[in-house]
Image (tube, helix red, strand yellow):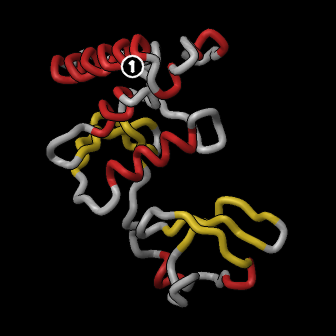
Amino acid sequence: MPDESWYRVRVEKFDKDKACVICVDFGNGITVDKRELRPLSPKLSSAPIQAKECKMAYIQVPAVGEDYGEEAAEFFYNMSWGKDLLASVESKEGDKTMVGLGDGTDLFNASMVEAGFGIVPQSVRVTEPRKLNMVKALREKEAEARNARVGRWQYGDFRDHESDF
């Protein structure tokens, strides 16, 4: 690790002499030399993992390797870095927790959609009034972003070529 400390990690993939890992107690990822990895003692491995994997509820954003993925990641970074964040659990899907994420002033889910990086999949179905209002507001922000041609909407409706939406 860059700071010469030891961390509990989960190996995501190996690439030649490198390993892509997730620090399970902090949630950040890093690439390290495979020779830096060590087995974890049973005493340490029995402690609960501190970071929980979450996704922003009701929206999809492009992955870093996809079109507009780098821009979406940079937008999210600029919006969230150095802030105390608040998460509201909206649902659970398997081992993933879907959250409304914000800083007490802005809901980041809505900001991602408003900036043209997040979309609300057609498959989103909710029944509770509060969640219905949230999804309705997200769909309105999506329509505004599409009409303003911001972010992924820059050249029109990119979903014409996507089957998941």
What residue is rendered at 75% in x and 71% in y?
A: 18
Can you say whether 93 is above or below 78 in the image? above
- Name the quadrant containing residue 30: bottom right
What residue is rendered at 65% in x and 84% in y?
A: 38
- Name the quadrant containing residue 11: bottom right
Can you say whether 43 is above or below 72 in the image? below
Q: How many C-alpha atoms fall within 10 Å of the one at disc 1: few (<14), some, or many (≥20)? A: many
Comparing 150 with 55, the one in front is 150
Q: Amino acid at mark 1?
A: Ala
Q: Is residue 143 left or right of residue 7?
A: left
Comparing 154 with 133, the one in front is 154
Q: How many marks?
A: 1
The residue carrying mark 1 is 145
What residue is rendered at 72% in x and 78% in y?
A: 33
Can you say whether 58 is above or below 32 in the image? above
Residue 5, given in percent of the width and then of the height, sits at 50, 88
Q: Residue furthest bottom?
A: 4
Q: Secondary structure at mark 1?
A: helix
Quadrant containing the C terminus in the rendered view = top right
Comparing 43 with 84, the one in front is 84
Q: Is residue 107 left or right of residue 97?
A: left
What residue is rendered at 41% in x and 75% in y?
A: 47
Residue 131, given in percent of the width and then of the height, sits at 23, 23
Can you say whether 66 is above or below 123 in the image? below
Comparing 82 with 154, the one in front is 154
Residue 123, given in percent of the width and then of the height, sits at 46, 15
Q: Is residue 37 left or right of residue 117?
A: right
Quadrant containing the N terminus in the rendered view = bottom right
Residue 113, given in percent of the width and then of the height, sits at 38, 27
